[in-house]
Image (cartoon, rainbow, N blue to C red):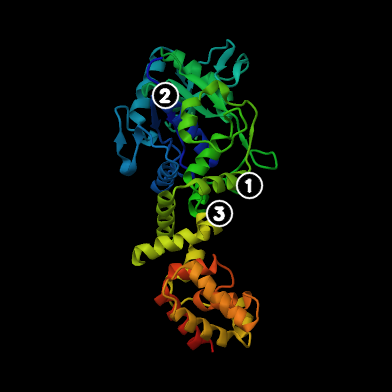
Amino acid sequence: MSEVRVRFAPSPTGLLHVGGARTALFNWLFARHFGGKMILRIEDTDTARNTPEAVAIIFKGLRWLGLEWDEGAQEGGGNLGDYGPYYQSQRSAVYQQYVTQLLAADRAYREADGAIRFRMPKTPGVVNDLICGKITFDRTTEPDPTIVRKDGTPVFHFVNVVDDLEMRITHVIRGEDHLSNTHKHIALFEALGAPPPRYAHIPLILNPGGSKMSKRDEGASIGEYIAQGYLPAAVRNYLCLLGWSPKDNREVINISEVIEKFDLPQINRGNARFDINKLYWINGEHWKSLTVTEYHQYARDYLTHRGVNTAAVDETYLTGVLDIVREKIKLGRDLPDWVEPFFNEEFAYDEKSLTVTLKEPAAKSRIEKLSAAFMTVSEWTAAKLEETLKSLAAADGVKVGAYVHPCRAGVAGRAVGPSLYHMLEVMGKERALARLRRTLTVIF
Ligand code: GLU
């Protein structure tokens, strides 16, 4: 096979839809599998929706998913590669040349109103799709398609074909909603004297209700996953399963294995069903298998993204806190709240701490006894702190909880949190004692 060249050709709409992201992913996987190139082409001829922000959302989503493209559009209207500009809005001169070519060859004609139509062959249109198989379209009653509107703007089908031709695309991998027009695209290629690329139409993604997923459905936008702190590798893993599978029921798969195995004929013909719970579960599996370094990096990035200044926190303290909250967290969005009391010496007290735990008549004396006992602990470890707290409870003849609850409220203001003894250990003696002192001052 000559060099594989595929493209992702989104129209900027203001969001990167899961369907679009999956199309980009399948193109990327195919390019990576065959050592080819993925081109990013922005189909921005709809000027009303064509804003730099809408294009930036596409760049951001693709990069977040790790789907780096080899050639094509980039920020600031610049281009990567030899076949640009990769923004259709900047390619009018190219389209004009091809219109002239079709008119000269009498494969297109001008209407009285100035619109230009393509002389569509009346012979059956045959598409040999790599996923959907052979499909034949009857064209005997079809009107000739318009390729340039009367206002002079070329239509989607035409520019799409010209660009695939010019950019030497070998495989067009896109959503099934484009299948019914593909015979027109092939006819245009033939009229332009160029061999058409191979086509592969991937099945639609349905929402849990069974209808085509729209941009209003929950989980439809990649931006939501970024905001909620899903792991990009987990989202990418889940998107792989929307139409492809390793055939042995595994759902958590490493991307390098997908690249190695990916090919178009194995894509399911049936529509894929979007399931946010499955994605949530896959995210949890990826979360568990992050290495400590990866987890720290991810958590730091996410917290920064949410406006938490992690650089202001002592490094050892930061990583200690991240380690003890890890098992409590499923998504990045849980992180800011879990770490907040650790980084704020002026932490607030939650409802339960204020109205129940610290209202308990013995709370004050227990915090005082804990402070005194902790003061003498020389080895500040979770095990020693547990031992110290338990012996105070035993001496009073009360349950361990009678000391755990006020202690937790006293050092963090929260009724729930990670293991108390580990929290204390990570806070360190000085900080923990200062926090207990503060509670004694502000609450009692
Ligand atoms: N701009 C088209 C879309 O977003 C792309 C069609 C194609 O991939 O050929 O649906």
Instruction: Name the residue type under label 2.
Output: Asp
Among the 4 quarters of the image, the one containing residue 124: top right
Locate residue 296: give its quadrant.
bottom left
Q: Nearer the viewer, mark 3 or mark 2?
A: 3
Query: Can residue 384 be seen by looking at this rendering?
Result: yes
29 with respect to 401 (left or right): left
| Comparing labels 2 and 1, the label whose residue is closer to the camera | 1
Q: Which of pointers 2 and 1 lies earlier in the amino acid sequence? A: 2
Q: Where is residue 219 shown, x and y percent of the image?
A: 58, 47
Crowd around label 3: few <14 · some 14–19 · many ≥20 (10 Å): many
31 versus 228 height, above or below: above
Foreground residue, 266 or 340? 340
How many labels were placed on the picture? 3
- SS type, badge 3: loop
Q: Are marks 3 and 2 in contact (CB under 8 Å)?
A: no
The residue singled out by tag 1 in the image is 277
State if disc 3 and disc 1 touch (CB < 8 Å). no
Which mark sits nearer the N-terminus, 1 or 3?
1
Mark 2 — residue? Answer: 164
Residue 167 percent across, percent down from the top left: 37, 24
Could you tell me if the residues under marks 2 and 1 are in contact, i.e. CB atoms within 8 Å?
A: no
Could you say where residue 411 lies in the image, as x and y percent from the top left? 50, 76
Residue 69 location (% of width, % of height): 38, 34
Q: Quadrant of the N terminus?
A: top left
View extreme (right): residue: 209
Distance in Å between CA atoms under marks 3 and 2: 42 Å
